[in-house]
Amino acid sequence: MISENIYFYYAFPLVMSIAFFWFLLYFYYTKRYTSFVKSFLDLANNIALVHDDKSTISINKIGLNFFGFESLERLNHEYSTISGLFIEEDGCVDKYTYGKDWLKILTEKNQKQIKVKLYSHIDEMEQYFHVQISNMKYQNQYLLIFNNITEIEQEKKEIRKLADYDALTKIYNRVKFNEIFPEVFYKANRYGEKFSVILFDIDHFKLINDNYGHNVGDKVLIELSRLVNMNLRETDIFARWGGEEFIIVAQFSTAEETIKLASRLQKEVENYTFDVVNEVRCSFGVTEFKTKDSQMTILERVDKALYYAKENGRNQVVLR
Protein backbone atom coordinates (compact mmCIF):
# COMPACT_ATOMS: atom_id res chain seq x y z
CA MET A 1 0.00 0.00 0.00
CA ILE A 2 2.87 2.34 0.89
CA SER A 3 4.73 1.50 -2.38
CA GLU A 4 1.61 2.31 -4.42
CA ASN A 5 1.35 5.70 -2.74
CA ILE A 6 5.03 6.38 -3.44
CA TYR A 7 4.45 5.54 -7.12
CA PHE A 8 1.44 7.82 -7.24
CA TYR A 9 3.17 10.75 -5.57
CA TYR A 10 6.57 10.46 -7.27
CA ALA A 11 6.56 8.27 -10.39
CA PHE A 12 3.26 9.40 -11.92
CA PRO A 13 4.10 13.14 -11.92
CA LEU A 14 7.49 12.28 -13.45
CA VAL A 15 5.87 10.32 -16.29
CA MET A 16 3.42 13.14 -16.90
CA SER A 17 6.23 15.69 -16.93
CA ILE A 18 8.18 13.68 -19.51
CA ALA A 19 5.07 13.25 -21.66
CA PHE A 20 4.34 16.97 -21.45
CA PHE A 21 7.97 17.73 -22.36
CA TRP A 22 7.76 15.56 -25.49
CA PHE A 23 4.46 17.17 -26.40
CA LEU A 24 6.01 20.64 -26.17
CA LEU A 25 9.02 19.47 -28.16
CA TYR A 26 6.76 17.96 -30.85
CA PHE A 27 4.63 21.10 -30.95
CA TYR A 28 7.74 23.29 -31.21
CA TYR A 29 9.29 21.38 -34.09
CA THR A 30 5.96 20.89 -35.86
CA LYS A 31 5.34 24.61 -35.68
CA ARG A 32 8.86 25.31 -36.91
CA TYR A 33 8.40 22.78 -39.73
CA THR A 34 5.08 24.36 -40.76
CA SER A 35 6.61 27.82 -40.66
CA PHE A 36 9.60 26.65 -42.71
CA VAL A 37 7.36 25.01 -45.34
CA LYS A 38 5.22 28.12 -45.68
CA SER A 39 8.31 30.33 -46.08
CA PHE A 40 9.73 27.93 -48.66
CA LEU A 41 6.49 27.89 -50.69
CA ASP A 42 6.24 31.67 -50.69
CA LEU A 43 9.71 31.86 -52.29
CA ALA A 44 8.47 29.96 -55.35
CA ASN A 45 7.58 31.87 -58.50
CA ASN A 46 4.90 29.33 -59.41
CA ILE A 47 1.92 27.79 -57.65
CA ALA A 48 3.40 25.65 -54.88
CA LEU A 49 1.68 23.63 -52.18
CA VAL A 50 2.04 20.76 -49.74
CA HIS A 51 -0.67 18.11 -49.80
CA ASP A 52 -1.22 15.01 -47.70
CA ASP A 53 -3.54 12.06 -48.29
CA LYS A 54 -6.63 14.14 -47.61
CA SER A 55 -6.17 17.89 -48.05
CA THR A 56 -3.89 20.81 -48.80
CA ILE A 57 -1.56 21.42 -45.83
CA SER A 58 0.04 24.62 -47.05
CA ILE A 59 -0.08 26.77 -50.20
CA ASN A 60 1.71 29.93 -51.27
CA LYS A 61 0.08 33.29 -51.98
CA ILE A 62 0.48 32.84 -55.73
CA GLY A 63 -1.61 29.67 -55.53
CA LEU A 64 -4.33 31.21 -53.38
CA ASN A 65 -4.62 34.20 -55.73
CA PHE A 66 -4.67 31.96 -58.80
CA PHE A 67 -7.47 29.78 -57.44
CA GLY A 68 -9.37 32.78 -56.07
CA PHE A 69 -9.28 32.01 -52.31
CA GLU A 70 -8.43 34.37 -49.49
CA SER A 71 -7.19 31.61 -47.17
CA LEU A 72 -6.10 27.97 -47.00
CA GLU A 73 -9.09 27.20 -44.77
CA ARG A 74 -11.47 28.48 -47.43
CA LEU A 75 -9.74 26.42 -50.11
CA ASN A 76 -10.02 23.23 -48.06
CA HIS A 77 -13.63 24.02 -47.24
CA GLU A 78 -14.49 24.23 -50.95
CA TYR A 79 -12.20 21.42 -52.16
CA SER A 80 -11.19 18.51 -49.95
CA THR A 81 -8.37 17.74 -52.40
CA ILE A 82 -6.60 20.03 -54.85
CA SER A 83 -7.41 17.62 -57.70
CA GLY A 84 -11.00 18.83 -57.43
CA LEU A 85 -9.79 21.95 -59.26
CA PHE A 86 -8.36 19.99 -62.19
CA ILE A 87 -10.45 20.45 -65.36
CA GLU A 88 -11.25 17.34 -67.39
CA GLU A 89 -9.61 17.16 -70.82
CA ASP A 90 -7.94 14.47 -72.91
CA GLY A 91 -4.29 14.16 -71.97
CA CYS A 92 -4.79 15.88 -68.61
CA VAL A 93 -5.19 14.37 -65.14
CA ASP A 94 -8.45 15.27 -63.40
CA LYS A 95 -10.11 14.31 -60.11
CA TYR A 96 -11.50 11.10 -61.62
CA THR A 97 -8.29 9.82 -63.25
CA TYR A 98 -6.80 8.14 -60.17
CA GLY A 99 -9.46 8.81 -57.54
CA LYS A 100 -8.96 10.03 -53.98
CA ASP A 101 -5.57 8.27 -53.61
CA TRP A 102 -4.17 9.98 -56.70
CA LEU A 103 -0.96 11.24 -55.07
CA LYS A 104 -0.15 7.88 -53.54
CA ILE A 105 -0.85 6.08 -56.81
CA LEU A 106 1.27 8.49 -58.84
CA THR A 107 4.14 8.15 -56.37
CA GLU A 108 3.94 4.35 -56.44
CA LYS A 109 3.93 4.48 -60.24
CA ASN A 110 7.03 6.69 -60.01
CA GLN A 111 5.27 9.32 -62.12
CA LYS A 112 6.98 12.52 -61.08
CA GLN A 113 5.12 14.86 -63.44
CA ILE A 114 1.57 15.18 -64.74
CA LYS A 115 -0.28 17.62 -66.99
CA VAL A 116 -3.35 19.40 -65.62
CA LYS A 117 -5.75 22.09 -66.80
CA LEU A 118 -6.79 24.81 -64.33
CA TYR A 119 -8.93 27.93 -64.31
CA SER A 120 -7.13 31.16 -63.41
CA HIS A 121 -9.20 33.59 -61.37
CA ILE A 122 -6.58 36.23 -62.09
CA ASP A 123 -6.68 36.05 -65.90
CA GLU A 124 -10.19 34.52 -66.00
CA MET A 125 -9.09 31.84 -68.45
CA GLU A 126 -8.11 28.18 -68.53
CA GLN A 127 -4.40 27.40 -68.41
CA TYR A 128 -2.19 24.31 -68.58
CA PHE A 129 0.44 23.20 -66.09
CA HIS A 130 3.01 20.48 -65.59
CA VAL A 131 2.85 19.47 -61.94
CA GLN A 132 6.04 18.15 -60.37
CA ILE A 133 5.35 15.83 -57.44
CA SER A 134 7.86 15.07 -54.68
CA ASN A 135 7.22 12.70 -51.79
CA MET A 136 8.41 14.55 -48.66
CA LYS A 137 8.41 11.36 -46.53
CA TYR A 138 6.90 13.32 -43.65
CA GLN A 139 3.46 12.14 -42.53
CA ASN A 140 2.64 11.15 -46.14
CA GLN A 141 3.02 14.70 -47.41
CA TYR A 142 3.79 15.69 -51.00
CA LEU A 143 5.29 18.84 -52.48
CA LEU A 144 3.55 20.01 -55.68
CA ILE A 145 5.09 22.62 -57.97
CA PHE A 146 2.95 23.89 -60.88
CA ASN A 147 4.87 25.02 -63.99
CA ASN A 148 2.78 26.99 -66.49
CA ILE A 149 2.96 25.46 -69.99
CA THR A 150 0.00 27.31 -71.54
CA GLU A 151 2.07 28.92 -74.30
CA ILE A 152 3.65 25.58 -75.19
CA GLU A 153 0.22 23.90 -75.33
CA GLN A 154 -1.16 26.69 -77.53
CA GLU A 155 1.76 26.28 -79.91
CA LYS A 156 1.11 22.53 -80.04
CA LYS A 157 -2.55 23.15 -80.83
CA GLU A 158 -1.59 25.54 -83.62
CA ILE A 159 0.74 22.93 -85.09
CA ARG A 160 -1.97 20.25 -84.86
CA LYS A 161 -4.45 22.67 -86.44
CA LEU A 162 -2.10 23.29 -89.36
CA ALA A 163 -1.72 19.54 -89.80
CA ASP A 164 -5.45 18.74 -89.55
CA TYR A 165 -7.13 21.68 -91.27
CA ASP A 166 -7.14 22.95 -94.82
CA ALA A 167 -5.18 26.22 -94.85
CA LEU A 168 -7.67 28.00 -97.14
CA THR A 169 -11.13 26.89 -96.01
CA LYS A 170 -10.28 26.09 -92.35
CA ILE A 171 -12.18 22.79 -92.48
CA TYR A 172 -10.62 19.32 -92.18
CA ASN A 173 -8.18 18.37 -94.90
CA ARG A 174 -8.04 15.00 -96.65
CA VAL A 175 -5.30 13.71 -94.34
CA LYS A 176 -7.44 14.36 -91.27
CA PHE A 177 -10.47 12.82 -92.97
CA ASN A 178 -8.48 9.66 -93.67
CA GLU A 179 -7.57 9.58 -89.99
CA ILE A 180 -11.18 9.96 -88.78
CA PHE A 181 -13.06 7.87 -91.33
CA PRO A 182 -11.73 4.43 -90.23
CA GLU A 183 -13.18 5.04 -86.75
CA VAL A 184 -16.61 5.83 -88.22
CA PHE A 185 -16.36 2.77 -90.40
CA TYR A 186 -15.34 0.58 -87.43
CA LYS A 187 -18.33 1.71 -85.35
CA ALA A 188 -20.68 1.00 -88.23
CA ASN A 189 -19.37 -2.55 -88.52
CA ARG A 190 -18.99 -3.18 -84.80
CA TYR A 191 -22.09 -1.50 -83.38
CA GLY A 192 -24.36 -1.13 -86.39
CA GLU A 193 -24.21 2.67 -86.39
CA LYS A 194 -25.63 4.10 -89.59
CA PHE A 195 -23.85 6.73 -91.65
CA SER A 196 -23.96 8.17 -95.15
CA VAL A 197 -21.48 10.05 -97.30
CA ILE A 198 -21.92 13.14 -99.47
CA LEU A 199 -19.34 14.05 -102.10
CA PHE A 200 -19.88 17.35 -103.91
CA ASP A 201 -18.02 19.84 -106.02
CA ILE A 202 -18.50 23.21 -107.70
CA ASP A 203 -19.88 23.13 -111.22
CA HIS A 204 -17.64 24.78 -113.83
CA PHE A 205 -15.15 25.94 -111.21
CA LYS A 206 -12.43 26.20 -113.87
CA LEU A 207 -14.46 28.92 -115.59
CA ILE A 208 -14.58 30.91 -112.35
CA ASN A 209 -10.79 30.76 -112.09
CA ASP A 210 -10.35 31.57 -115.80
CA ASN A 211 -12.80 34.49 -115.85
CA TYR A 212 -12.17 36.06 -112.44
CA GLY A 213 -8.76 34.79 -111.36
CA HIS A 214 -7.60 32.35 -108.68
CA ASN A 215 -8.00 34.85 -105.85
CA VAL A 216 -11.73 35.07 -106.56
CA GLY A 217 -11.84 31.30 -106.92
CA ASP A 218 -10.28 30.97 -103.47
CA LYS A 219 -12.90 33.35 -102.03
CA VAL A 220 -15.64 31.16 -103.52
CA LEU A 221 -14.17 28.09 -101.82
CA ILE A 222 -14.01 29.94 -98.49
CA GLU A 223 -17.59 31.28 -98.75
CA LEU A 224 -18.92 27.88 -99.84
CA SER A 225 -17.21 26.11 -96.94
CA ARG A 226 -18.70 28.53 -94.43
CA LEU A 227 -22.17 28.27 -95.97
CA VAL A 228 -22.13 24.46 -95.88
CA ASN A 229 -20.64 24.31 -92.38
CA MET A 230 -23.48 26.47 -91.05
CA ASN A 231 -25.98 23.83 -92.20
CA LEU A 232 -24.27 20.79 -90.67
CA ARG A 233 -24.62 19.16 -87.28
CA GLU A 234 -21.77 18.84 -84.80
CA THR A 235 -21.65 15.10 -85.46
CA ASP A 236 -21.14 15.59 -89.21
CA ILE A 237 -17.59 15.39 -90.55
CA PHE A 238 -16.78 17.98 -93.22
CA ALA A 239 -13.53 18.03 -95.18
CA ARG A 240 -11.98 19.40 -98.34
CA TRP A 241 -11.42 16.38 -100.54
CA GLY A 242 -9.24 18.20 -103.03
CA GLY A 243 -9.46 21.22 -105.35
CA GLU A 244 -13.14 22.18 -105.52
CA GLU A 245 -14.34 18.82 -104.15
CA PHE A 246 -15.71 18.39 -100.62
CA ILE A 247 -16.83 15.39 -98.58
CA ILE A 248 -19.32 15.07 -95.71
CA VAL A 249 -19.88 12.06 -93.46
CA ALA A 250 -23.38 12.31 -92.01
CA GLN A 251 -23.12 10.12 -88.93
CA PHE A 252 -26.20 8.26 -87.64
CA SER A 253 -28.04 9.17 -90.88
CA THR A 254 -29.84 7.01 -93.42
CA ALA A 255 -29.74 7.59 -97.18
CA GLU A 256 -33.17 9.22 -97.04
CA GLU A 257 -32.11 11.67 -94.33
CA THR A 258 -28.85 12.43 -96.11
CA ILE A 259 -30.58 13.12 -99.45
CA LYS A 260 -32.66 15.74 -97.66
CA LEU A 261 -29.48 17.27 -96.26
CA ALA A 262 -27.75 17.29 -99.65
CA SER A 263 -30.84 18.78 -101.32
CA ARG A 264 -30.98 21.53 -98.71
CA LEU A 265 -27.30 22.30 -99.24
CA GLN A 266 -27.80 22.39 -103.01
CA LYS A 267 -30.62 24.95 -102.61
CA GLU A 268 -28.64 27.00 -100.08
CA VAL A 269 -25.75 27.29 -102.53
CA GLU A 270 -28.08 28.02 -105.45
CA ASN A 271 -29.84 30.85 -103.57
CA TYR A 272 -26.71 32.38 -102.06
CA THR A 273 -25.14 35.48 -103.62
CA PHE A 274 -21.38 35.00 -103.73
CA ASP A 275 -18.97 37.90 -103.74
CA VAL A 276 -17.93 38.95 -107.28
CA VAL A 277 -19.25 35.87 -109.12
CA ASN A 278 -22.77 36.09 -107.61
CA GLU A 279 -23.95 32.63 -108.70
CA VAL A 280 -22.39 29.25 -107.88
CA ARG A 281 -23.85 25.79 -108.47
CA CYS A 282 -22.84 22.42 -106.99
CA SER A 283 -23.43 18.77 -107.85
CA PHE A 284 -23.89 16.18 -105.09
CA GLY A 285 -23.39 12.43 -104.85
CA VAL A 286 -24.89 10.52 -101.91
CA THR A 287 -24.53 6.95 -100.67
CA GLU A 288 -25.28 5.01 -97.48
CA PHE A 289 -23.04 2.52 -95.69
CA LYS A 290 -23.92 -1.10 -96.46
CA THR A 291 -22.96 -4.16 -94.46
CA LYS A 292 -20.51 -5.57 -97.01
CA ASP A 293 -18.85 -2.23 -97.71
CA SER A 294 -15.16 -1.55 -97.35
CA GLN A 295 -13.87 1.99 -97.00
CA MET A 296 -12.85 1.87 -100.65
CA THR A 297 -16.18 0.60 -102.00
CA ILE A 298 -18.27 3.24 -100.26
CA LEU A 299 -15.98 6.03 -101.45
CA GLU A 300 -15.97 4.65 -104.99
CA ARG A 301 -19.78 4.46 -104.95
CA VAL A 302 -20.26 8.06 -103.80
CA ASP A 303 -17.72 9.18 -106.41
CA LYS A 304 -19.79 7.45 -109.12
CA ALA A 305 -22.92 9.17 -107.78
CA LEU A 306 -21.23 12.56 -108.11
CA TYR A 307 -19.97 11.71 -111.59
CA TYR A 308 -23.50 10.77 -112.65
CA ALA A 309 -24.85 14.06 -111.27
CA LYS A 310 -22.31 16.02 -113.29
CA GLU A 311 -22.81 14.01 -116.47
CA ASN A 312 -26.58 14.44 -116.34
CA GLY A 313 -27.09 18.17 -116.01
CA ARG A 314 -25.15 19.20 -112.86
CA ASN A 315 -26.64 21.19 -109.94
CA GLN A 316 -28.46 18.15 -108.60
CA VAL A 317 -28.34 15.37 -106.00
CA VAL A 318 -27.83 11.72 -107.04
CA LEU A 319 -28.08 8.66 -104.78
CA ARG A 320 -26.33 5.39 -105.45
Image (cartoon, helix red, strand yellow):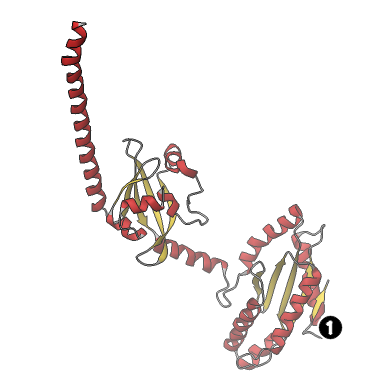
User: Could you say where residue 189 lies in the image, as x and y percent from the top left?
Assistant: 76, 55
**Which of 1/119 is in front?**
1
Count every numbered label the image shows and give the total. 1
Q: Is residue 84 above or below residue 219?
A: above
**Which of 146/122 is in front?**
122
Tell me the residue at 43%/50% (across/down). Answer: 83
User: Could you say where residue 315 lies in the image, as x and y percent from the top left?
Assistant: 77, 85
- Determine which quarter of the picture holds residue 170: bottom right
User: Could you say where residue 161 lies in the image, as x and y percent from the top left?
Assistant: 52, 67
Q: Quadrant of the C terminus?
A: bottom right
Residue 303 seen in render? no
Residue 272 seen in render? yes
Residue sitting farthest toward the front: 1
- Determine which quarter of the picture holds residue 232: bottom right
Tell me the residue at 82%/78% (across/down). Answer: 308
**Which of 257/166 is in front?**
257
Dot 1: what SS? loop
Q: Which residue is mark 1?
A: 312
Q: Quadrant of the N terminus?
A: top left
User: Could you say where residue 72 lies in the image, as x and y percent from the top left?
Assistant: 32, 51
**Which of 260/37 is in front?**
37
From the viewer's perspective, is 174 left or right of 24?
Answer: right
Tell me the residue at 67%/68% (across/down). Answer: 236
From the viewer's perspective, is 4 left or right of 285?
Answer: left
Three-letter residue code for mark 1: Asn
